[in-house]
Image (cartoon, grey):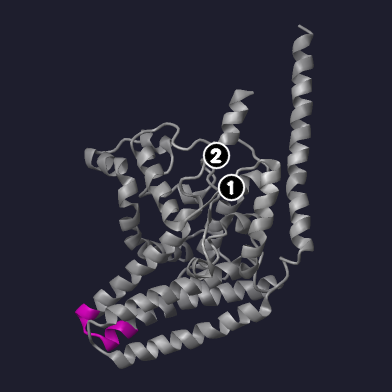
């Protein structure tokens, strides 16, 4: 009987040693990144972008008014969708404290970019996104895998559904990208629900004012310049393309990566690296995805300025190789294939569609 407590103590001692070593793994990487200067601010880069936002938006509005009431405005709607997404990416940088040292400056920059220029609530996004960064792909912790339309985990299949809903879930991978045409509308509505809800929200009055000006003003402009039918189509196309662009930029980052059981605790380095995916490409991909293609580096160092992410990637990849920590990088369309196959496997009832390797390792002990 004495042998059992001894083995348990040895196991616990080893577990503490492993935990301590894993905690120091990120510390060593962080020191390398800081010493390389990759955390320093890029004021020239960001001030150029911040100055370009109102100028570009004003130019697009002037062009919209000058073109007038014509179905050619559907092209303008596509331009606005791309512009608003790029502004949202810049707001994302500010929200992560990438632009300024001052938290207040970053907050106000995000409010102006997100609420006033794009029409998305900063308070809603911050509440949701903070929880995602803390526990990416963790069941009951990451809100990004707890959405009502798509089933990302096998556990959600246990809920009773009708025959039509069950068929749609079984083929949800195919419908994932078409569903994104509604994502733009969903983002706006989620923000409005948050700011007009009862939960505590900092700067609620400012958010409501900015959202009213942006959403109401943009809709009013469309109906003032265009006939009702064309205006409705213009707003619909702009919202649909905005949602597709946003969703197509965020979907490759974590969808189809290991899902973490809610009871499993993982050290910071492995939690962020193994549940994230980078997208391989050139500077065009960097611009098109707003730096989100370096998702691993962004999750490890959220306040790292966007232009430094591409320089940090090879450092992080080499470090992970030394520690034998899986570091995944794929092409953009390959990542979309992974997402579709994963969602279909979940929808068809696969109980272990993409298991967390750390959880499997724990079970094997």
Q: In the visual, does 359 lie left or right of 217?
A: right
- Residue at the (74%, 30%) spot, across then down: 15
**Does residue 210 show up?**
no
Q: Are marks 1 and 2 in contact (CB under 8 Å)?
A: yes
Image coordinates of residue 48 in percent, x first then y, are 59, 83
Main SS, magenta residues: helix
Question: In which quadrant of the rendered image does the C terminus lie?
Answer: top right
- Determine which of the numbered discs, if any, sits on residue 18 in the image: none
| Quarter occupied by residue 309 | bottom right
> Callout 1: helix, strand or loop?
loop
> Callout 2: helix, strand or loop?
loop
**Does residue 240 show up?**
yes
Q: Nearer the viewer, residue 205 or 333?
A: 333
- Residue at the (44%, 88%) spot, across then down: 58
How packed mark 1 is, by other alpha carbons closer than 10 Å (few <14, some 14-19, many 20 or more), is many
| Residue indicated by mark 1 | 135
Q: Nearer the viewer, residue 328 or 267?
A: 328
| Residue indicated by mark 2 | 260
Magenta highlight range? 221-230
- Residue at the (64%, 38%) spot, across then down: 265
Image coordinates of residue 7 in percent, x first then y, are 76, 17
Q: Is residue 320 positioned above or below 155 on the image? A: below
State the CA–CA distance, disc 1 to disc 2.
Answer: 9 Å
Q: Is residue 32 positioned above or below 217 on the image? A: above
| Quarter occupied by residue 266 | top right
């Amino acid at each position: 009987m004495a042998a059992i407590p001894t083995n348990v103590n040895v196991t616990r001692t080893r577990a503490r040693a492993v935990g301590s070593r894993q905690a120091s793994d990120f510390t060593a990487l962080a020191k390398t990144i800081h010493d390389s200067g990759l955390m320093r601010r890029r004021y020239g880069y960001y001030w150029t972008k911040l100055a370009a936002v109102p100028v570009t938006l004003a130019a697009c509005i002037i062009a919209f008014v000058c073109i007038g009431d014509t179905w050619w405005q559907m092209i303008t709607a596509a331009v606005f969708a791309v512009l608003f997404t790029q502004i949202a990416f810049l707001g994302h940088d500010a929200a992560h404290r990438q632009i300024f040292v001052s938290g207040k400056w970053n907050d106000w920059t995000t409010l102006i970019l997100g609420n006033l220029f794009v029409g998305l609530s900063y308070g809603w996004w911050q509440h949701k996104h903070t929880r995602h960064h803390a526990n990416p792909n963790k069941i009951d912790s990451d809100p990004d895998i707890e959405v009502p339309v798509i089933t990302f985990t096998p556990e959600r299949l246990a809920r009773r559904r009708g025959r039509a809903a069950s068929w749609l879930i079984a083929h949800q991978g195919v419908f994932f990208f078409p569903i994104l045409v509604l994502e733009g509308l969903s983002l706006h509505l989620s923000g409005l629900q948050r700011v007009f809800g009862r939960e505590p929200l900092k700067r609620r009055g400012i958010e409501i004012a900015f959202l009213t000006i942006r959403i109401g003003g943009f809709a009013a402009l469309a109906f003032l310049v265009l006939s009702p039918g064309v205006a409705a189509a213009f707003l619909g196309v702009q919202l649909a393309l905005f949602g597709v662009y946003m969703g197509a930029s965020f979907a490759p980052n974590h969808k189809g990566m290991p899902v973490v059981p809610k009871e499993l605790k993982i050290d910071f380095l492995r939690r962020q690296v193994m549940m994230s995916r980078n997208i391989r490409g050139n500077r065009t991909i960097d611009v098109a995805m707003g730096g989100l293609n370096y998702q691993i580096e962004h999750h490890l160092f959220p306040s790292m300025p966007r232009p430094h992410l591409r320089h940090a990637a090879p450092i992080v990849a080499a470090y992970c190789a030394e520690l034998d920590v899986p570091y995944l990088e794929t092409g953009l369309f390959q990542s979309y294939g992974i997402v579709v196959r994963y969602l279909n496997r979940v929808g068809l009832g696969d109980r272990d569609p993409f298991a967390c390797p750390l959880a499997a390792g724990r079970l094997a002990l």
